[in-house]
Image (cartoon, rainbow, N blue to C red):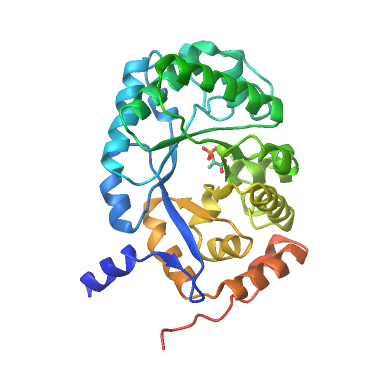
Amino acid sequence: KRARAAEARALPARTRDGHEVQIGANINLAEQAAFAIEQGAEGVGLMRTEFLFLERGDSPTEEDQYRAYSDMARAMGDRPLVIRALDIGGDKQVSYLDLPREENPFLGVRGARLLLRRPELLVPQVRALYRAARDGAQISVMFPMITSVAELLALRETCDRIRAELEAPAIPLGIMIEVPSAALLADQLAQHADFFSIGTNDLTQYALAIDRQNPVLAPEADSLHPAVLKLIDLTVRGAHAHGRWVGVCGGIAGDAFGAALLAGLGVDELSMTPRDIPAVKERIRQSDLSDLQGLAQQALAARDAVAVRALALPPVREED
Ligand code: PEP
Ligand code: MG
């Protein structure tokens, strides 16, 4: 029985009618790679690099970072690995960086906004990434908290310059879509980004104006709110219009119902906590894409998240 379960986890997340969704893991440490692969991960869709900066007294060096990225790439072998550039600010504060105190850190100098203002953070990280790529690591980089085309172009320019200096190969450069402005501009952003990854935790926070850490409002901060789904729909359309793939790496990607809905919206990749992978794969394998597309259309027309969650899941189709 256990062997059967392990076999099932290794199968692709392919619907009965042949549509395949890529499955990634959200992990930060190379030591977590083996477990993620065992659970059925086909790659890493989100490696958060904040962990390198948190709970220590000073910034990690370029060398420290180069080692962490290379270790993860080695642990993942030929599988895709998406490394997210530093997303400090908001709920993640680091004392030694001397960041100014802000009234509303979630609306402040966070993610790409901080990287663009602090080259001493951006440059060593990008150098470490290209050095790993120069060694043959199969990596992509993505930038958090993008709100405009100008930010993306500025970051791309820095990446291009560093790549040329290091004589490193090009690596795919993607962005997080986690602010409504980015979702609304997806069509334009897709002209300049190689891929998108939707951060539904922040996208929900910013679309619904609910602090993601506020326990009182937690039940209402549902990523299946139709307003959030409409932003996801726009993002997928914008990406696909330019031949870019789009993933989701927020918490809803690891919820079996949410994952099915996202597949119905046309999301190409779902990245989640490793332990959520088996149930998500199973749910997708039991579905027909056409049913999931119908579910997604109903969800987009629903009046609130409660109504979305009440939608009947397409019947689970047992193997005949
Ligand atoms: C998100 O916002 O959904 C996300 C994946 O990033 P983080 O949770 O690290 O902000
Ligand atoms: Mg986020």
Q: Relative to 319, does residue 178 appear above or below in the rendering?
A: above
Ligand 1's image quarter is top right
| Residue found at x 57% / y 32% | 144
| 315 or 319, nearer to the observer | 319
Q: Residue furthest bottom?
A: 320
Asked if one can make out residue 209 in the rendered structure from this viewpoint, the answer is no
Q: Nearer the viewer, residue 132 or 119?
A: 132
**Residue 141, percent from left and from top:** 48, 33
Q: How many marks?
A: 0
Q: Is residue 273 visible?
A: yes
Q: Is residue 77 above or below residue 280?
A: above
143 left or right, relative to 190: left
Q: Position of residue 258 (x, y in %)?
A: 57, 61
The reply, left or right, for residue 293 in relation to residue 87 is right
Q: Measured from the top left, where is residue 275 in percent x and y? A: 37, 56
Quadrant of image for the N terminus = bottom left
Viewer-closest of 195 and 161? 161
Q: Identify the residue at image location x=36%, y=54%.
A: 41
* Quadrant of res 62: top left
* Image x and y of residue 231, in percent: 71, 50
